[in-house]
């Protein structure tokens, strides 16, 4: 998996370079301190994932991603930012990003976890971002969907961003069992991504805290 990073802080770029060296199959193929000629750079370096400091995007993120994908259709965009405000985060998610990393509290361990998740083809959202997204809601919306008792038990963990492994450990289930329930829940709701599931929880006023 080839990563290209755009950040105006040299320390961030160097830190990412060291982290990626620890992960088999990951490579930092290029870097820049601005978005100038970014499409050409991504194509030249055959990048799979663009890691972008959101503050460097001078146009609306959704417009930027649409324009970028017109030239580099397969690119996945992951943003990071110190911003912890709800509206910009929601706008970023609706723009089609593949992940959002909270830069303000970024640690080496989280960066490792994020890169490993992306390497596996998964989305990655910092726990702080997930907490901001899910907020505190009631479970009024759950009655509109026919969830089994076990699905109702698992659903709050899913909407709080927990992995199959984490849920399995808490509920004493196998990961395969949790994965099956996850697929069934998302099929019933009609979503394909964890972020879509979280947004569904918001729209239906669903209590996400297990």
Image (cartoon, rainbow, N blue to C red):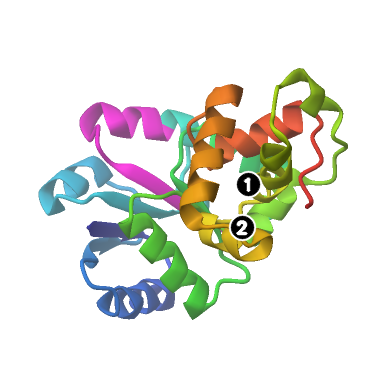
**Disc 1 secondary structure class:** helix
Q: Which residue is mark 1?
A: 158
Position in image of residue 162 (x %, y %): 60, 55
Q: Is residue 60 above or below residue 210?
A: above
- Asked if residue 104 lies left or right of residue 7, the reply is right
Q: Which residue is mark 2?
A: 167
Residue visible at 22% across and 35% down? 72
Residue 87 colored in magenta in the image: no
Q: Tell me the crowding category of disc 1: few under 14, some 14 to 19, or many 20 or more residues within 10 angstroms, Cα based.
A: many
Position in image of residue 132 (x %, y %): 73, 50
* Location of residue 2 by image quarter: bottom left
Residue visible at 41% across and 53% down? 52
Marks 2 and 1, how far apart at CA: 8 Å
Which is nearer the N-term, disc 2 or disc 1?
1
Residue visible at 49% across and 56% down? 175
104 or 109, nearer to the observer: 109
Position in image of residue 158 (x %, y %): 63, 46
Q: Are marks 2 and 1 in contact (CB under 8 Å)?
A: yes
1 or 29, nearer to the observer: 1
Position in image of residue 59 (x %, y %): 48, 35
Residue visible at 52% across and 61% down? 165
181 or 196, nearer to the observer: 181
Q: Is residue 206 above or below residue 112?
A: above
Magenta span: 64-83
**Disc 2 secondary structure class:** helix
């Amino acid at each position: 998996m080839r990563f290209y990073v755009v950040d105006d802080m040299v320390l961030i770029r160097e830190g990412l370079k060291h982290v990626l060296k620890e992960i088999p199959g990951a490579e930092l193929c290029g870097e820049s301190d601005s978005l100038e000629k970014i499409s050409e750079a991504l194509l030249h370096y055959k990048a799979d994932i663009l890691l972008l400091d959101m503050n460097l995007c001078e146009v609306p993120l959704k417009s930027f991603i649409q324009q970028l994908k017109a030239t580099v259709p397969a690119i996945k965009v992951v943003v990071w930012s110190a911003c912890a405000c709800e509206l910009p985060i929601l706008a970023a998610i609706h723009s089609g990003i593949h992940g959002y990393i909270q830069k303000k509290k970024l640690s080496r361990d989280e960066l490792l976890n994020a890169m490993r998740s992306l390497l596996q083809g998964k989305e990655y959202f910092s726990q702080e971002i997930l907490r901001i997204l899910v907020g505190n809601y009631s479970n009024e919306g759950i009655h509109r969907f026919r969830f089994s008792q076990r699905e109702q038990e698992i659903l709050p963990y899913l909407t709080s961003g927990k992995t199959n492994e984490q849920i399995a450990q808490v509920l004493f289930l196998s990961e395969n069992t949790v994965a099956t329930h996850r697929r069934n829940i998302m099929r019933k709701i009609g979503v394909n991504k964890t972020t879509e599931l979280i947004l569904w929880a918001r729209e239906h006023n669903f209590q996400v805290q297990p």
